Each structure stands twice: as structure tokens, then as C-alpha cells.
Amino acid sequence: MKVFIVHAHHEPRSMNGALTAAATEALTRASHEVEVSDLHAMRFDPVSDRRNFTSAKDETYLKQQLEEMHAVASGTYSPDLAAEMRKVEACDLMIWQFPLWWFGPPAILKGWVDRVFAMGWAYGGGKIYETGPFRGKRALLSLTTGGPREAYVKGGFNGDLDGILRPLQRGMLQFCGFDVLAPHVVYGPVRLGDDERAALLAAWASRLSRITDESPIDVGTY
């Protein structure tokens, strides 16, 4: 199986960095092929504009979706974005590794989606959800939170985590055809001791060693 990890944290020694390292090791040990896009190390620019393209459909007015469809049809996406598209196309499983900031992904990850998930390639032409271009592929969110587990339940301080993640799991991943696996969440890593941290990393590695046995979840609708 080919696994593509999109890593979105600036500190390699963070829990997010440790989770990506543990995932890479566990998946490789299980004979899977792993590719990682470390967005900060790549200095990935999250701002979407004409730099996405090497040609223009309309040089006088930038309509993003029109230019995306033109670039997909003509093969004129910028080389850096075309490389990310090829990684998505090649993978069987995509993992997004990130900290939950302001009830969403960091800007660098959201910008990666904005720039890479182009109309005419990731969706469009009536191909969405069950008919999306990436049907047959699977995706998984792996994330850390600032608050404890009890803050992310219905009636909790921050509300239901399933609802918080729905824009990503339903509005981005399922929208483009991915089957979504249960998210992996590490709550409040800043308050963890070394033994707790090691146990959570081992549990993540153990889950990934059997990831091919997992079934998609129902992420709900709006």
C-alpha cells in the first residue's frame, strides 16, 4: 500500500513531529511505501493566486476555478503543485497530521488543500462525494488538541469534535471521493509525561500496523 502523509507542524520535536515519525516507521516496517510532504520544511506557500499556473485562460480577470480547470486540461499547473497532485494520485491512503488551531487546521494545511485540490481534478463535472475522483482511496486525520478529551464531547467546553472535524472529513475528503477512517486524536499533549507520550505513540504505531483492516466511518452530513 502507498501512504501519503501531509505533515503540518513547524517543530520537528513536537508531538505532531513524533506522530509522523512513528507513522513512517510503523508503516515502513509493515512493508508499506510512505511519502511525506513536510509543508513547513518545504516552505509551502498557502496563498492561492496566479502562481498556481504557468499559463492563463483569462489574463484580465482571475477566476480561480476557471483557471484551475484550464490548468488541469492543459497540463499547466506549477511544477510544485503538480508534484503534490501526483502524490495524491499515487497513494492508497492519505494521512493529514496537524495540530487543531482555532477549531480547524493550520493555515498552511488549509492552503495546501486550496491550491492542490483543483476543480477539474479533485472534483467537478458532477464528480463529488460517491462519484468523486478519489473514490477507492482512503484518508485519515491525525491531530493534536490543546484541551483535554472531555472538552471535545457534546456538551463539553469546546463542543463535539466530530462536528469540528466535519468540514475536513465531509467537506474536503468525502467531497472528493475519499473513504474516511476514524480520526486519531492526541488530547493535550503539552500536559503529557514521557511515559504517556511513549504509550500514545506506540498505540498509533500499533493501529497503523493493522490499518488495512479498518473500515470507513460515517462522518455525518450538514
Image (cartoon, rainbow, N blue to C red):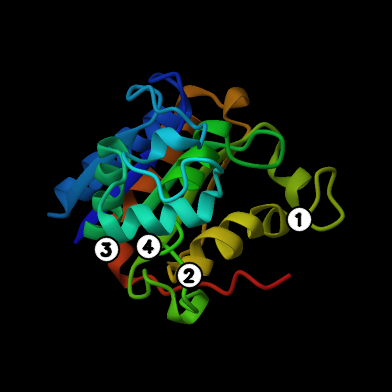
Q: Is 79 or 2 nearer to us in this picture?
A: 79
As drawn, the residue found furthest toward the front would be 60
Q: Amino acid at mark 1?
A: Asp
Q: Which residue is mark 1?
A: 160
Mark 1 vs mark 2: which is more N-terminal?
2
Give the Cα distance between marks 1 and 2.
30 Å
Task: Classify mark 1: helix, strand or loop.
Answer: loop
Q: Amino acid at mark 4?
A: Trp
Q: Is 153 or 58 nearer to us in this picture?
A: 58
Mark 4 vs mark 1: which is more N-terminal?
4
Q: Classify 44 as above or below 75.
A: above
Instruction: Please rate how many residues cluster around mark 3, counting C-alpha atoms within 10 Å: few if below 14, some from 14 to 19, many from 20.
Output: some
Q: Which residue is mark 4?
A: 121
Horizontal arrangement in the rendering, residue 113 relative to residue 202 (left or right): right
Instruction: Please rate how many residues cluster around mark 4, counting C-alpha atoms within 10 Å: few if below 14, some from 14 to 19, many from 20.
Output: many
| Residue 79 image position (x, y, % from top left) | 25, 38
Asked if disc 2 and disc 4 are in contact, CB closer than 8 Å, the reply is yes
Give the Cα distance between marks 4 and 3.
17 Å
Asked if disc 1 and disc 3 are in contact, CB closer than 8 Å, the reply is no
**Image quarter in which the N terminus is found:** bottom left
Mark 4 vs mark 3: which is more N-terminal?
3
Give the Cα distance between marks 2 and 3.
21 Å
Horizontal arrangement in the rendering, residue 42 relative to residue 200 (left or right): left
Instruction: Please rate how many residues cluster around mark 2, counting C-alpha atoms within 10 Å: few if below 14, some from 14 to 19, many from 20.
Output: some
Give the Cα distance between marks 1 and 3.
29 Å
The residue mark sitting in front, 4 or 1, is: 4
| Residue 103 image position (x, y, % from top left) | 70, 41
The residue under the point 38% across, 41% down is: 6
Quadrant location of residue 7? top left
